[in-house]
């Protein structure tokens, strides 16, 4: 039994410290996912808080035979983020978002490399902003959430082939927007299958 499974069992038995530990364990990643989808720290905080609160209050609905806890929690987070998007159209700030999501920096980048890296991040984020919400959701879940296609399908509530198609279409749209540059190279390598 993993530590998370143990915490879930303890929370189901009423141990409030276990609920706090689950919250602490998932708070940052949940916030980052919501921020990637919403692009606004206040909205992301609202979505993350709401998702975590819902998951903890409804822990009896979580079925570990059907999915991992993080997948279930991210499904809730995406749903809460969609609700917020319906209410307001956010303005994304690449600089704020990338502060917590940068690739490991080159230990000795020169001034030109620093400018190129910054320009590439801005170009990517601007292109991500232009995607429709469904494609933006898929690409954020894939590259910044680190989810497999199967997990994306579960979170987005669609078949796995649809999740794959959405990510592929997002890559195509980003390549068009970025004038054919290698999107995968700019975003980092494909991690999960």
Image: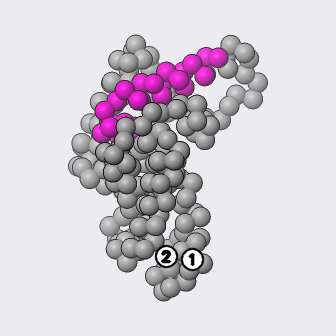
Q: Is residue 24 magenta?
A: no
The image position of residue 71, as x and y in percent, is 40, 58
Left or right of 47? Residue 110 is right
Q: Is residue 33 at least partly visible in the picture? A: no
Left or right of 123? Residue 58 is left
Residue assigned mark 2: 8
Tell me which corner region of the image, top left, top right, bottom left or bottom right, holds residue 113: top right
Residue assigned mark 1: 18
- Proximity of marks 1 and 2: CB atoms separated by less than 8 Å: yes
The image position of residue 133, as x and y in percent, is 32, 37
Tell me which corner region of the image, top left, top right, bottom left or bottom right, holds residue 119: top right
Circle 1 packing at 10 Å, graded few (<14), some (14-19), many (20+), is some
Residue interval drawn in magenta: 115-140
Quadrant for the C terminus in the image:
top left
| 97 versus 58 height, above or below | above
Question: At 42% across and 68% down in the image, what residue appears?
Answer: 55
Circle 2 packing at 10 Å, graded few (<14), some (14-19), many (20+), is many
Give whichever of 54, 143 is nearer the camera.
Answer: 54
Q: Residue furthest front?
A: 87
Question: At 44% across and 20% down in the image, what residue appears?
Answer: 182
The image position of residue 166, as x and y in percent, is 29, 37
Give whichever of 97, 69 is nearer the camera.
Answer: 97
What colouring method underlies this structural image? one colour
| 180 versus 35 height, above or below | above
């Amino acid at each position: 039994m993993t530590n998370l499974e143990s915490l879930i069992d303890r929370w189901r038995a009423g141990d409030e410290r276990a609920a706090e530990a689950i919250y602490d364990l998932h708070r940052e990643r949940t916030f980052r996912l919501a921020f990637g989808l919403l692009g606004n720290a206040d909205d992301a905080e609202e979505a993350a808080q709401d998702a975590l609160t819902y998951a903890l209050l409804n822990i009896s609905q979580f079925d570990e035979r059907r999915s991992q806890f993080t997948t279930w929690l991210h499904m809730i987070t995406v749903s809460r983020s969609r609700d917020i998007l319906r209410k307001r159209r956010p303005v994304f700030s690449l600089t704020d978002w990338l502060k917590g999501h940068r690739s490991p920096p080159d230990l000795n980048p020169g001034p030109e490399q620093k400018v190129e890296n910054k320009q590439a991040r801005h170009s990517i984020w601007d292109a991500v902003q232009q995607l429709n919400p469904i494609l933006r959701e898929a690409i954020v879940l894939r590259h910044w959430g680190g989810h497999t296609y199967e997990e994306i399908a579960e979170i987005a509530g669609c078949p796995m082939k649809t999740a794959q198609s959405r990510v592929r279409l997002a890559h195509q749209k980003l390549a068009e927007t970025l004038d054919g540059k290698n999107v995968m190279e700019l975003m980092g390598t494909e991690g999960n299958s």
